[in-house]
């Protein structure tokens, strides 16, 4: 089954090469990476783990339109994973 969730990707204030990732619909949905590609890899890994191991902490995905209103000025990335 394929899952798609939006995550907020933000450059770290102290080290702009470092990227923090937050999933608004997953608790706790926080990870990071030392580049965009690494942050995306870590986000996919976290999403798979949470969906498999803690599905009760994963809420239905919020639409991009609603997220933009709730988190103005943030950069969103669609993270997609497939779970057997």
Image (spheres, helix red, strand yellow):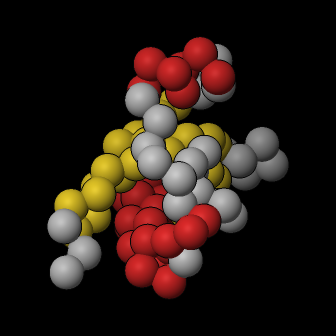
- Pick out the residue farthest to the front: 56
Q: Residue at x 44, y 19 (%)?
A: 65
The correct choice, above or below, for 3 with respect to 55 in the image is above
Dividing the picture into quadrants, the one containing residue 63 is: top left
Residue 6 figure quarter: top left
Residue at x-position 32% and y-position 50%: 4
Q: Is residue 28 left or right of residue 49?
A: right
Q: Tell me if residue 17 can be seen.
A: no
* Residue 47, quarter of picture: bottom left
- In this orientation, which residue lies closer to the viewer: 13 or 63? 63
- Residue at point 25%, 75% (across, down): 83
Point 55% across, 77% down: residue: 54
Closer to us: 34 or 40: 40
Q: Nearer the viewer, residue 13 or 20?
A: 20
Quadrant of image for the C terminus: bottom left
Residue at the extreme right of the image, as rendered? 14
Q: Is residue 66 visible?
A: yes
Q: Is residue 49 above or below residue 15?
A: below
Badge count: 0
Horizontal side of residue 17 vs 43, given as left or right: right
Location of residue 82 with respect to 49 vertically, above or below: above
Residue 9 x, y percent position in the rendering:
54, 43
> Which quadrant holds the N terminus?
bottom left
Q: Is residue 61 left or right of residue 27?
A: left
Q: Above or below — where is 46 with respect to 58? A: below
- Residue 53: x and y in percent read 50, 83
């Amino acid at each position: 089954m394929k899952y798609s969730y939006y995550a907020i990707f933000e450059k770290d204030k102290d080290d702009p090469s470092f990227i923090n990732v937050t999933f608004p619909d997953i608790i706790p949905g926080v990870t990071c990476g030392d580049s965009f590609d690494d942050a995306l890899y870590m986000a996919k890994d976290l999403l798979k783990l949470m969906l498999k191991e803690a599905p009760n902490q994963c809420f239905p995905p919020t639409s991009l339109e609603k997220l933009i209103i709730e988190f103005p000025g943030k950069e969103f990335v669609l993270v997609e994973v497939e779970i057997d």
